[in-house]
Image (spheres, rainbow, N blue to C red):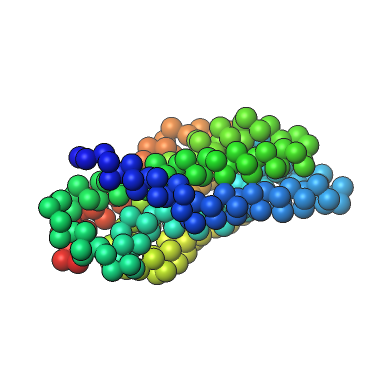
């Protein structure tokens, strides 16, 4: 595979509006929720601190993982939609596929560039968000906060793969983002409701969106990781086979 187009795609993504918006949105969310935590009534702060799992990096991270990360799924699905939807929206996909390059090679190239770009941009946003929260809220373990975000990447890549799978039949960015975001929210709220009903329980390993909670709470990860990995691979392979055989 020729790496030059992949590197050009990564470069375009890193300087794109999508990248800028990702970092800005994460910084704004961090600032907003850090101020909410900082200026909350003492009784409310005590109640939140009492709910923080032992393995968490602090009260801010607990709120971040439980509430903010759900909104950030929009960022993940937007990168998942980049693989084919951006080109289809621009009406350039058919033209690109008419070149002497197999669909498989095209798909691998676009997927690699999108995943690599997402990992770089999301971690930059995480570093800035963590820095903002650390400056405002006391008690945030910033290195652990960053480590936890690296550890939840398998979960985010599952959302990424889920979005790509939906993008093959939907083709347009708007519909793909809406469906990917909706399904991610359903899976995420499912495990939250289970925990609310039985606070002493652990989230099911078969819900990929519960992986982030397991990371933050310091729960066992091995079995849950294998489930997330298998489901992510299945979605990528199924979407890839569908795309390679579909007459677009």
> For this view, does 59 lie left or right of residue 156?
right
Say whether residue 95 is left or right of residue 217. left
Locate the N terminus and report the quarter of the image it occupies: top left
Q: Quadrant of residue 241?
A: bottom left
- Residue 242 in view in this figure: no
Residue furthest to the left in view is 100
Going 62% across and 31% down the picture, which residue do you hit?
Answer: 144
Horizontal arrangement in the rendering, residue 203 relative to residue 37 (left or right): left
Q: How many marks?
A: 0
Q: Residue at x 64, y 44 (%)?
A: 129
Q: Is residue 91 visible?
A: yes
Q: Position of residue 69 (x, y in %)?
A: 57, 51
Which x, y percent locates residue 220? 51, 32
Foreground residue, 103 or 186?
103
Q: Nearer the viewer, residue 89 or 40?
A: 89
Q: Residue extending furthest top?
A: 143
Quadrant where the C terminus sits is bottom left
Nearest the camera: 132 or 210?
Answer: 132
Q: Residue at image x 55%, y 41%? A: 124
Q: Position of residue 55 (x, y in %)?
A: 63, 33
Q: Residue at x 67, y 48 (%)?
A: 30
Task: Please state the horizontal and vertical placement of residue 102, each as a whole percent of the image.
Answer: 15, 51
Outermost residue on the right side: it is 42
């Amino acid at each position: 595979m020729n790496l030059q187009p992949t590197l050009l795609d990564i470069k375009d993504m890193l300087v794109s509006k999508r990248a800028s918006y990702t970092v800005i949105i994460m910084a704004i969310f961090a600032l907003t929720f850090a101020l909410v935590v900082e200026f909350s009534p003492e009784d409310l702060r005590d109640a939140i601190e009492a709910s923080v799992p032992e393995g968490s990096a602090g009260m801010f991270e607990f709120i971040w993982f439980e509430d903010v990360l759900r909104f950030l799924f929009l960022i993940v699905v937007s990168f998942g939609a980049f693989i084919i939807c951006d080109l289809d929206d621009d009406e350039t996909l058919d033209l690109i596929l008419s070149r002497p390059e197999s669909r498989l090679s095209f798909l691998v190239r676009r997927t690699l560039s999108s995943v690599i770009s997402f990992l770089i941009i999301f971690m930059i946003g995480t570093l800035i968000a963590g820095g903002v929260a650390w400056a405002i809220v006391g008690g945030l373990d910033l290195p652990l906060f960053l480590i936890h975000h690296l550890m939840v990447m398998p979960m985010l890549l599952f959302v990424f793969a889920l979005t790509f799978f939906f993008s093959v039949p939907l083709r347009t960015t708007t519909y793909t983002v809406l469906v990917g975001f909706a399904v991610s929210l359903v899976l995420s709220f499912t495990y939250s409701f289970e925990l609310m009903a039985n606070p002493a329980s652990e989230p099911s390993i078969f819900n990929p969106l519960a992986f982030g909670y397991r990371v933050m709470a310091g729960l066992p990860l091995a079995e849950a990781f294998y489930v997330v990995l298998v489901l992510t691979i299945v979605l990528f392979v199924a979407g890839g086979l569908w795309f390679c055989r579909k007459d677009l």
